[in-house]
């Protein structure tokens, strides 16, 4: 997701309709949830681990249940990752640092407890995620991000009428 993206959140994806069609978040899905440290705020992150999963990060490489997650470099610091049926890009650089920050790019192994999720942002050096504030409760999940219904251009960005037309009504993967 990019700044000024407006999204639809499918709030029935995990609760179902009167309990019918109820499911649980899966690895690779992008979920919206109440921020653990400030429950009045909503956060959006990618589910990396579900109950029982062992997760670690070594040199920017995600390791899930002892298996290195497939990734391919598309440019320095940007990688295409694949988790389940979900293919997405992750960023391991920022504007001041074109490469990996060794402290941020590693994390000791953790095991996800029952009823919890481990989430990461796709921009791995920016923002907050489970590496900082721990697991999120599955009950805190409000829904699955499903569609970008509008994408406005950031200041200084070139776009017709200030809209990123190629992102309007794009399915979130």
Image: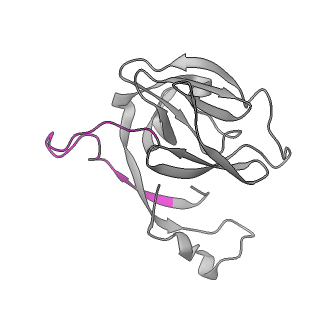
Residue 120: quarter of image: top right
The residue located at (26%, 39%) in the rendering is 23
Residue 122: quarter of image: top right
Magenta stretch: residue 22 in it? yes
Q: Is residue 133 above or below residue 13?
A: above
Quadrant in which the N terminus is drawn: bottom right
Q: Is residue 76 above or below residue 112?
A: below
**Residue 12 image offset from top left, x and y in percent:** 26, 47
As drawn, is 152 to the left or to the right of 86? right
Q: Nearer the viewer, residue 34 or 82?
A: 82
**Residue 162 image offset from top left, x and y in percent:** 62, 76
Considering the whole magenta stretch, tell me its main secondary structure: loop
Q: Nearer the viewer, residue 115 or 109?
A: 109
Q: In the rendered structure, which segment of residues is drawn in magenta?
A: 6-27
* Furthest-bottom residue in this view: 160
**Residue 44 image offset from top left, x and y in percent:** 50, 43
Q: Is residue 162 above or below residue 65?
A: below
As drawn, is 52 to the left or to the right of 123? left
Q: How is the image coloured?
A: one colour
The residue located at (35%, 22%) in the rendering is 115
Magenta stretch: residue 150 in it? no
The residue located at (44%, 38%) in the rendering is 27
**Residue 31 image offset from top left, x and y in percent:** 43, 43
């Amino acid at each position: 997701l990019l700044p000024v993206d407006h999204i639809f959140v499918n709030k029935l994806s995990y609760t179902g309709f009167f309990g019918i069609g109820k499911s649980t978040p899966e690895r690779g899905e992008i979920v919206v949830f109440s921020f653990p440290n400030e429950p009045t705020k909503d956060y959006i992150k990618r589910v990396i681990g579900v109950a029982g999963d062992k997760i670690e990060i070594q040199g920017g490489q995600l390791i899930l249940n002892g298996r290195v997650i497939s990734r391919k470099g598309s440019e320095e610091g940007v990688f295409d990752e694949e988790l389940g049926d979900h293919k997405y890009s992750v960023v391991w650089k920022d504007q001041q640092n074109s490469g990996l920050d060794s402290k941020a790019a590693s994390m000791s192994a953790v095991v996800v407890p029952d009823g919890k999720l481990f989430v990461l942002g796709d921009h791995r050096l920016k923002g907050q995620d489970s590496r900082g504030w721990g697991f999120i409760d599955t009950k805190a999940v409000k829904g699955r991000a499903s569609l970008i219904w509008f994408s406005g251009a950031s200041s200084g960005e070139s776009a017709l009428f200030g809209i990123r037309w190629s992102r309007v009504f794009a399915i979130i993967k």
